[in-house]
């Protein structure tokens, strides 16, 4: 049973679609003459990635990676490991990592460093939400859907305890 938690809508499905289309247009232009591999970060990015990919006007390949962090999240040395590897070749490819939300930045920093060791042609980041108040390590997010300072966000793929991923809009959860 879902917990009776109050949630407040931040962006409607329509507003998200409008923003995703804009991002897709920019990305399509930037990678016009390149072969692009989208790497979605599971599970949160699955909804965003499917909408983003379907709005691109360039051909892309797609793959997914899944990361898990363990130890205390408040430790800046938060340990992260890959629990589902990327299966397509990365070497000499243009990679665009598709992430749901960047918070401390530790997950993305880890993934970026991991990918760079595999010698891709380039690695850029596209995140639906840049939540900047708790950033611990600096990461450059090349394409940002929405910037918000803080709060716990659910919907459109993002979860709280595996709930709310199915909601078409984005909500601020009052925990
Ligand atoms: P970071 O390593 O602190 O940047 O954490 C990023 C990951 O934590 C995201 O990919 C999400 O899976 C999760 N996360 C962080 N903030 C939120 C939130 O507000 N709602 C849902 N998941 C979040
Ligand atoms: Mg995530």
Image (spheres, helix red, strand yellow):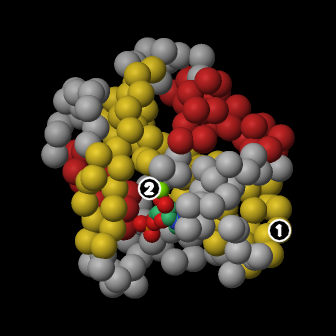
The quarter of the rendered structure image containing the C terminus is bottom right
Does label 2 or label 1 sit earlier along the sequence? 1
| Residue 142 visible here | no
| Residue 50 visible here | yes
Q: Nearer the viewer, residue 112 or 158?
A: 158
Residue depth check, mark 2 versus mark 1: number of the one nearer the observer: 1
User: Pointer 1: residues within 10 angstroms few (<14), some, or many (20+)?
Assistant: few
Q: Nearer the viewer, residue 164 or 150?
A: 164
| Secondary structure state at the residue bearing disc 1 | strand
- Tell me where residue 141 appears, x and y as whole percent: 48, 52
Q: Which residue is mark 1?
A: 8
User: Pointer 2: residues within 10 angstroms few (<14), some, or many (20+)?
Assistant: few
Disc 2, ligand 1: is the CB inside 8 Å? Answer: no
- Tell me where residue 89 appears, x and y as whole percent: 22, 27
| Secondary structure state at the residue bearing disc 2 | loop
Residue drawn at (26%, 71%) of the image: 79
Residue drawn at (38%, 38%) of the image: 64
The quarter of the rendered structure image containing the N terminus is bottom right
Q: Which residue is mark 2?
A: 140
Q: Quadrant of residue 39?
A: top left
In the rendered image, the vertical position of residue 34 relative to residue 103, given as above or below: above
Q: Quadrant of residue 5?
A: bottom right
Q: How many marks?
A: 2
In the rendered image, the vertical position of residue 99 relative to residue 76, given as above or below: above
- Tell me where residue 135 appears, x and y as whole percent: 47, 73
Residue farthest front in this picture:
1
In the image: residue 154, left or right of residue 49: right
Residue drawn at (51%, 27%) of the image: 30
In the image: residue 18, left or right of residue 160: right
Q: CA distance from mark 2 to mark 1?
A: 29 Å
Residue drawn at (16%, 46%) of the image: 117
């Amino acid at each position: 049973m879902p917990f009776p938690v109050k949630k407040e809508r931040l962006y409607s499905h329509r507003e998200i679609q409008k923003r995703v289309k804009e991002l897709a247009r920019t990305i399509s232009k930037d990678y016009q003459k390149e072969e692009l591999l989208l790497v979605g970060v599971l599970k949160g990015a699955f909804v965003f990635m499917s909408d983003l990919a379907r709005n691109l006007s360039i051909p892309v390949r797609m793959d997914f990676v899944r990361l898990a962090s363990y130890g205390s999240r408040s430790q800046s040395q938060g340990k992260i490991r890959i629990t589902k590897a990327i299966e397509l070749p990365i070497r000499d490819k243009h990679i665009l990592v598709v992430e749901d939300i960047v918070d401390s930045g530790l997950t993305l920093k880890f993934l970026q460093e991991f990918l760079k060791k595999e010698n891709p042609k380039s690695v850029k980041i596209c995140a639906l939400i840049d939540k900047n108040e708790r950033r611990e390590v600096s990461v450059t997010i090349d394409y940002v859907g929405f910037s918000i300072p803080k709060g716990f966000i659910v919907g459109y793929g993002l979860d709280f305890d595996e709930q709310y991923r199915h909601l078409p809009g984005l909500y601020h959860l009052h925990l």
